[in-house]
Amino acid sequence: MATKTDIKFQEDTDVLSATDEFCSLIVWNDEVNTFDWVIETLIEICGHSQEQAEQCAIIIDSKGKYSVKEGSYDVLKPMCDAITDRGINATIDVMAS
């Protein structure tokens, strides 16, 4: 039989896991944006090196999408918004734990 303390602990755990989920920032390929624009965006928004941004752009082009950054939702959300503000398609996916 669950006690009131057990139920409270479960609620605290659920809230904690919901806010600490590990996420992935996905950039999607399109036929509009140039390699240079995607590379510049990854450098400026995600803090990638030139080489890392170039490699990501090649993978995005060949596979259709790529996870360019991983972290918490709170960290990735402003990056995702900044990328989409530049006309590049980006989403955040919650990674399975």
Image (spheres, rainbow, N blue to C red):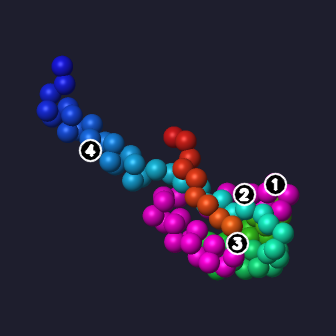
**Secondary structure beneath disc 4?**
helix
Identify the residue under disc 1: 63
Residue name at image x 26 percent, y 41 percent: 11
Q: In the image, is 57 to the left or to the right of 78? A: right
**Secondary structure beneath disc 2?**
strand
Calculate the distance from the C-alpha at mark 2 to the C-alpha at mark 3.
Answer: 13 Å
**Magenta residue span:** 60-88
The answer to whether the residues at label 2 and label 4 have Cβ atoms under 8 Å apart is no
Identify the residue under disc 2: 66
Identify the residue under disc 3: 88
Calculate the distance from the C-alpha at mark 2 to the C-alpha at mark 4.
Answer: 34 Å
Q: Position of residue 69 (x, y in %)?
A: 62, 61
Which callout, 3 or 1, points at the residue further toward the start of the chain?
Answer: 1
The answer to whether residue 80 is magenta is yes
Task: Examine the rendered structure and indicate whether residue 93 appears above or below residue 49.
Answer: above
Identify the residue under disc 4: 12
Which callout, 2 or 4, points at the residue further toward the start of the chain?
Answer: 4
